[in-house]
Image (cartoon, rainbow, N blue to C red):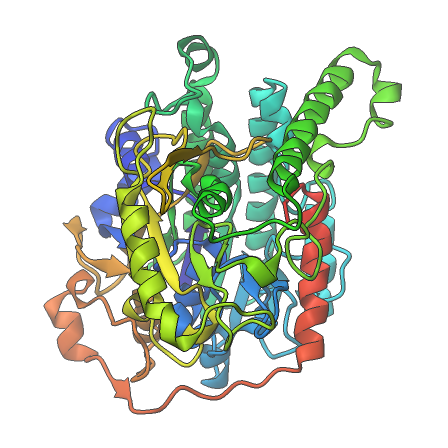
Amino acid sequence: MLLLIGIDGATPELIERLTSTGEMPALRSLMRHGVYGRMESSVNHDPCSAWSSLLTGVNPGKHGVWALRNIVPESYQWRMANSRMLRAPTLSQMLTDRGQEVGTVCVPMTFPAREAEWTTVAGWLAPSIEAAGFAHPDSAASLARRRLKDIPHDLRLGSYVAAGRYEEGVELAVESMRARTALTLDLLGQKRWDFLAVNFVELDRVLRWCWHLIDRKHSDFREDVFAQHGKLIATIHRELDAQIARLVESLGPDDHLMVVSAHGTGINSRAALCLPDWLAHLGLLSYRSSAGGAWRRLRNSIGNGIDGICDFLRDILPESLRGMIPDPDEGHAPIDADGDPWIDYERTFMIPTPGGNLYLNHEDTFPGGTVSNGTCDRLMLDVTAKLQSAIDPASGGRPLEWAKPRERVCSGPFVNQFPHIITRWDQSRTVMGLTATGGNGRVQVARPATGRIPSGAPSPLGILIAAGGGLRRGARIEGAKVEDVAATILHLRGESVPSYFDGAVLKQAMTDRMLEQVPVRILQRDPPRIIESPERIEAASEAVASRLRALGYEL
């Protein structure tokens, strides 16, 4: 069998340091007895997009999922990512179609669980363990509900961090990891699997909210806080390593193991939060009233203040009264289904996304489009040049690493649904503002929105570790990308790799003898056309959105 273990947010620098010092002995042993390398995430390193590429072997332009929030074609509405949006077959489907026994546990982009031949316990996008589509078949659903009933399906750590209760947040993450391990071991004991995947999201949640504890370049880093709580980052890594060790013990001598993180973690630069006001300063984004931007900022500031009050009351009130205080993460108002209610789309030329990318308000893309075919190229060049020259006044540096047209970073039939300008922002420091130089030569500074903001964010590099028969020992591999995982798993399971894949079998991870005995086989075929009912997609999206609103996401 092949066991795939996902550890969302695992960052190469941290993993390499902690394995070298002996704090992650299980991973250190796997690196010594197998192969290790840094792995490039999907182009926007969004977890939903990255996992979609990992599961399908293709780039976002072919599987159709750009991020957690995806624009609904020909509208200003956003749709939450879910499994019904995938437009390419997944590993589970391909292996099952070839007669193999397959299961996935808490893997992203598996909600709703498909009523198919493989076993699924959905990942964190599922609204709850009681939701329809949480798991399939019923026996797996019953087992998962027993194991996971006492832990949250996704971790809400913002309130713990805001109140300085870091230890409690990490303890919750540890409890969650142990429960997922127990569920996976239960499934491993039920039958002989050909392929089983399990994902741990807890490390990602801790690093996102606690990155400022350990990164001295973060504007929120404090030596006293680091001295008191900084060791918790090593604690969560050690616990994750212990859970991996438990799973490894269940494997036989002929089994294969892959440990992957589809993305890493780095500083949340907050540059993307500056973009709405940055565009407004340039006259490219207009609000419905002159006070629209101010109201937007005020709403976030008030929300942040309310969060602090709630945290304070939770600390001073007796336990019998704490339950009456609303969760601070639930205090943020969602954006209207028709788009941002503050934006006047009839006078707007560029629309920012949460990840810092930009849509042209193009007449062929949006119902109130203001950008014509004749002006779009010039506008894209102009905006790209202004982004590249924007400076953070606090540091004097330029936060943008690069900005490219979507066609240069993705390919496939769904590229036209993605932002027109794709950006990558420097994650070496937090951004205090972005300069915007208007047509009159006046320089203004756009500040990031306020509110409860994670100190960490997904970064472009994750990790890949593989061990088992036919794989090299103690080798370092270079140039791996997230799409390569699906191709490599298919090969290790004795299957051919579809020619439409963007990923390739990682031959450098394999011995010459294995490649001679089991040569890579390519199956010539076009990408299959997958059609899903828009109503079913929308129903799944709304189920995800309802849950995320309750978790405090700004939707």
Give the percent coordinates (x, y) of residue 507: 18, 68
Give the percent coordinates (x, y) of residue 442: 36, 36
In the image, 170 versus 193, the foreground residue is 170
In the image, 366 versus 514, the foreground residue is 366
Apparent side of residue 205 relative to residue 501 in the rendered image (left or right): right
The answer to which image quadrant residue 415 occupies is bottom left
Question: Number of marks in the image?
Answer: 0
Q: Residue furthest bottom?
A: 525
Q: Residue at x 21, y 78 (%)?
A: 518
Apparent side of residue 410 relative to residue 284 in the rendered image (left or right): left
* Quadrant holding the N terminus: bottom left
* Vertical position of residue 54 compared to residue 31: above or below: below
Q: Residue at x 72, y 61 (%)?
A: 543
Give the percent coordinates (x, y) of residue 427: 33, 38
Q: Is residue 58 in sight in this rendering?
A: no
Apparent side of residue 7 relative to residue 82 in the rendered image (left or right): left
The answer to which image quadrant residue 542 occupies is bottom right
Q: Residue furthest front?
A: 440
Q: Residue at x 38, y 30 (%)?
A: 430
* Vertical position of residue 242 compared to residue 135: above or below: above
In the image, 168 versus 139, the foreground residue is 168
Apparent side of residue 325 relative to residue 239 in the rendered image (left or right): right
Q: Residue furthest left?
A: 512
